[in-house]
Amino acid sequence: MKLAVIGAGQIVADFLPHASAVDGLTVTAILGTPRSREKLDRLAAEFGIPTAHTDYDECLADPEVDTVWIALPNALHFDHARRALLAGKNVICEKPFVLRAAELAELRQLATERDLILVEAISNQYLSNVEWIRQNVGRLGDLRVVQCEYSQYSSRYDAFREGTVLPAFDPAMGGGALLDLGIYTLHVVVDLLGRPESVDYAAHMERGVDTSGVVTLRYGDLTAVCVCAKDSPGPSRTKIQGTEGSIVVSGAPNIIPTVELHLRGEEVEIIDRNAHQHRMVEEFRAFTRMIGDHDIAERDRRLDHSAAVLDVALAALDSAGIAFAGQENRS
């Protein structure tokens, strides 16, 4: 996979030091705005990236690029993904995929027509600890309650309260707690339980954006609760409770660190199958394999899951009366 990194923000700086752990991945280009030229050149020099672009069309025309990783503010995902697919590039797009169901449907159609890989970058769906949970959740008997929580006092929240609105808190850019942190919790729950019968989001709102909230998903007599907060610190954890025991993860749902299996009458079993210390390495290994093998069936399976999560997220926002630019006509 010959990758162009689209963006130069925090998540890019977080992953690039670990990109060398992904066999078959070569970062061949990075794209940013003209005002970020100094930063682009610094990243390119530090990580041996041959080309730094400030023009997206030039980047898409680069013959040394076969895949783009879109790591931009949420509201920019659709347009950049669409342009990349039209240019014949595979697309890895950061979460949340897009802001409207119709946008994802259009991107999927383009990827299908052009026989390209299109996938959402969502780390927990590729972690080996999550695969272990999928395979062992049946040992818990009949499930009764699922809780998934991700709380983190945002480094941008103080600035937001003082009047400086950065993309993470900008409703016009698709910001807010649910689409930032909460989307990880929804991916965990929908992965394990499927689409819920009903969705409700009780959100704390400040200046038109949700800074924290609780999503309730109902599956018959089973209830799942997802908590997300960017305005207050708190423990992040996942608990899956059934008639025969529980699975507990103490840690953020984008990482899913050590898993504890508590079965009635048995010793606690401690599991840690994650293949790398950094949460993004396993997903990029999977993307590299998917693109290298041109695995269309895996692409479609992943897209089905992402579409289900997006539908749940949009239903949650709708239940709270939250609408921002790009979310009108969600169907």
Image: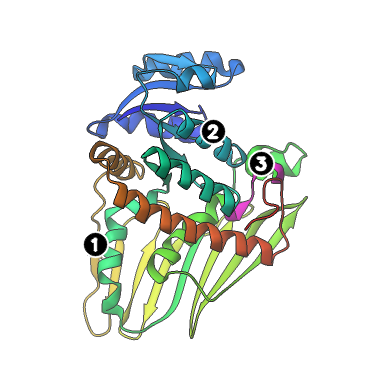
User: Which is more toward the observer, 225 or 286?
Assistant: 286
Residue most extreme to the front? 113
Q: Mark 3 falls on what kind of element?
A: helix
The answer, for residue 108, to whether it is visible in the render is: yes
Q: Mark 1 falls on what kind of element?
A: strand
Q: Which residue is mark 2?
A: 80
Magenta-drawn stretch, dominant element (helix, strand or loop): helix
Residue 204: image location, x then y, percent: 70, 60
Question: Mark 2: which amino acid?
Answer: His
Q: Magenta residues?
A: 171-178
Q: Which residue is mark 1?
A: 271
Quadrant holding the N terminus: top left
Q: From the viewer's perspective, tell me whether residue 289 is left or right of residue 116.
A: left
Question: Mark 3: which amino acid?
Answer: Met
Question: Mark 1: which amino acid?
Answer: Ile
The image quadrant that residue 259 belongs to is bottom left
